[in-house]
Image (spheres, rainbow, N blue to C red):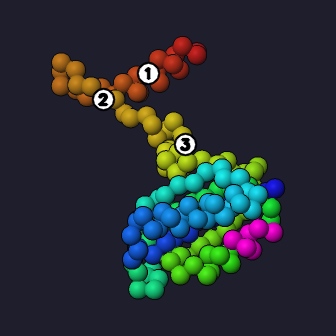
Amino acid sequence: MNTYETVFIVSPAIPLDDANAIFEKFKDLISANGGEILNSEYWGKLKMAYPINKHKDGCYYLIQYKADGKFNSELETRFKYDENVLRFVVVKLDGKTYKLRKRDEMTKPRSRRYEEKPQTEVNADGAVVDQNAEAEENSTQEKA
């Protein structure tokens, strides 16, 4: 069994409860055909890059799952015949280069460089003192 990911856009013209029912229908379809759901998320109602069927936004859903490769053609057929699904994509994930992460974890910075904020302080003379620069000087002096 391989790991796959599908993202699909549901029409914003239908109520959110019906869009969530479509989402659950596809999750049940994957499970019923021997697949294993690893992660499923509702990304929200987002603006699309270009209009599709006169809709400027859509409800985005993500499902990451393990399944047999032959099942994907069945899943794509179901997406095509559902009139409320505007667009979809199914992608095979390579386990070596991609780790399954939640959407919130993907938006966080990966490097400590972005987490550090410059700390400045004003001393009695009114001069601005950069504490990060002093810490770097002290660490280089200790190494020497």
Q: Main secondary structure of the magenta part?
A: helix
Residue at image location 52% in from the left, 51% down from the top: 103
Type of amino acid under label 2: Thr
- What crowding class fits label 3: few (fewer than 14 Cα within 10 Å), some (14-19), or many (20 or more)? few
Give the residue at mark 3: 110
Position of residue 115 relative to residue 87, above or below, is above
Type of amino acid under label 3: Arg
Residue 65 as seen in the image, left or right of residue 68: left
- What crowding class fits label 1: few (fewer than 14 Cα within 10 Å), some (14-19), or many (20 or more)? few
Q: Is residue 71 magenta?
A: yes
- For the residue pair 110 and 67, the one nearer the viewer reads as 67
Marks 2 and 3 sit apart, C-alpha to C-alpha, by 24 Å
In the image, which residues are magenta? 70-75
Marks 1 and 3 sit apart, C-alpha to C-alpha, by 23 Å
Q: Which mark is residue 135?
A: 1
- What crowding class fits label 2: few (fewer than 14 Cα within 10 Å), some (14-19), or many (20 or more)? few
Give the residue at mark 2: 120
Secondary element type, mark 1 = helix
Marks 1 and 2 sit apart, C-alpha to C-alpha, by 12 Å
Q: Nearer the viewer, mark 2 or mark 3?
A: 3
Secondary element type, mark 2 = strand
Q: Is residue 116 magenta?
A: no
